[in-house]
């Protein structure tokens, strides 16, 4: 039986990048046969030093988002990372067999430092904790976006280091990418990768005037609608491709490329994007409101998921302890 595991960091409200790169994948994967574990990475959130109230609020927001988007908790365990303390113990065991060079090559660490995030020991050793998250559940498949593949590869390396020293303890995981290329890199409103760190995201449950306002900020240029343009250079088309059927997006691209009297302006594209997002997220938005009105239900789901997750992680941690001579 295949075991699936993935998670999302609660560092603010989930944006489109989180949805297409993680949440959407996880909800879909949970319909497949196998065991499914999806966690809210609250320990990881501390690497950017948020205040305690923000962490609690963000954890709740992610949990509600998973449930509103349709995660079937009869088939998948949804839980807080910090409710499974065995993961931090496994992280220490992995840290003792992992060289500094591997961590120094982490793209995520270098990228965050380049964007002004103050480096901490936690941020530097982030890949070790992520490897422990993956390996603690005998994970086979890790649904992730392309930007997270390196972390899965590092988990493979760390499992190899530990197994090579102490015997076969950890299972080798494999990354699973989104089924479509268009979901593998979601742009921000400024054209960079969408990230909470960059302040360029679009909240998935935004609606009405607030949604129209953020869509209006998507980067464009001063070219007239009738001027022919390379569709690959029009950021709004990248956003539309996330929501429109292939035939419709190809029509938009063709009209932009040809130009002339029938070509759409940037305003038309923004209106279509707002309408598409409103329609796409309307059912989940309604479920979200119902869940926010019943916090006890969310707490029950998290507690039940944590119990199942911890039972599995306890088995793996004990196996690792014995192999390392701690029992």
Image (cartoon, rainbow, N blue to C red):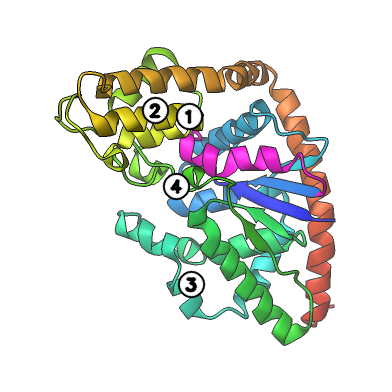
Q: Which mark is residue 103?
A: 3
Secondary structure beneath dot 3 equals: helix
257 or 137: nearer the eye? 257
Read off the magenta span: 12-34
213 or 28: nearer the eye? 28
- Mark 2 highlights which residue? 251
Please report contact status of discs 3 and 1: CB closer than 8 Å, yes or no: no
Q: Is residue 321 left or right of residue 292?
A: right
- Mark 1 highlights which residue? 247
Please report contact status of discs 1 and 2: CB closer than 8 Å, yes or no: yes
Q: CA distance from mark 4 to mark 3?
A: 23 Å
Please report contact status of discs 4 and 3: CB closer than 8 Å, yes or no: no
Q: Using the image, determine if residue 228 lies above or below residue 47.
A: above
Task: Give the number of the mark in front: 4 or 3.
Answer: 4
Please report contact status of discs 2 and 4: CB closer than 8 Å, yes or no: no
Q: Which of marks 4 and 2 precedes in the sequence?
A: 4
Q: Which mark is residue 185?
A: 4
Few, some or many residues within 10 Å of mark 3 (<14, 14–19, 20+): some
Residue 47, given in percent of the width and then of the height, sits at 48, 54
Task: Give the number of the mark in front: 2 or 3.
Answer: 2
Q: CA distance from mark 1 to mark 2?
A: 6 Å
């Amino acid at each position: 039986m295949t075991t699936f595991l993935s998670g999302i960091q609660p560092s603010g409200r989930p944006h489109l990048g989180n949805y297409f790169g993680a949440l959407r994948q996880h909800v879909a994967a949970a319909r497949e046969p196998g065991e499914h574990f999806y966690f809210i990475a609250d320990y990881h959130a501390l690497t950017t030093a948020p205040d305690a109230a923000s962490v609690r609020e963000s954890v709740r927001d992610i949990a509600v988002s998973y449930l509103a988007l349709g995660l079937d908790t009869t088939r998948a365990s949804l839980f807080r990372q910090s409710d499974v303390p065995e993961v931090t113990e496994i992280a220490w065991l992995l840290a003792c067999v992992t060289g500094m060079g591997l961590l120094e090559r982490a793209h995520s660490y270098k990228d965050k430092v380049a964007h002004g995030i103050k480096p901490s020991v936690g941020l530097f050793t982030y890949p070790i904790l992520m490897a422990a998250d993956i390996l603690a559940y005998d994970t086979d498949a890790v649904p992730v976006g392309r930007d997270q593949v390196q972390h899965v590869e590092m988990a493979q390396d760390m499992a190899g280091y530990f197994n090579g020293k102490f015997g076969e303890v950890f299972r080798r995981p494999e990354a699973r990418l989104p089924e479509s290329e268009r979901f593998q890199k979601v742009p921000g409103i400024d054209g960079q990768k969408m990230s909470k760190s960059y302040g360029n995201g679009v909240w998935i449950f935004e609606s009405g005037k607030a949604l129209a306002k953020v869509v209006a900020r998507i980067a464009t240029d001063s070219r007239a609608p009738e001027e022919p343009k390379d569709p690959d250079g029009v950021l709004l088309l990248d956003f539309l491709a996330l929501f429109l059927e292939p035939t419709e997006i190809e029509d938009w691209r063709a009209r932009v490329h040809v130009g002339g009297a029938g070509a759409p302006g940037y305003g038309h594209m923004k209106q279509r994007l707002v309408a598409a997002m409103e329609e796409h997220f309307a059912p989940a938005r309604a479920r979200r409101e119902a869940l926010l009105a019943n916090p006890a239900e969310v707490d029950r789901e998290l507690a039940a998921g944590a119990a199942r997750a911890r039972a599995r992680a306890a088995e793996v941690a004990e196996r690792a302890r014995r192999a390392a001579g701690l029992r």
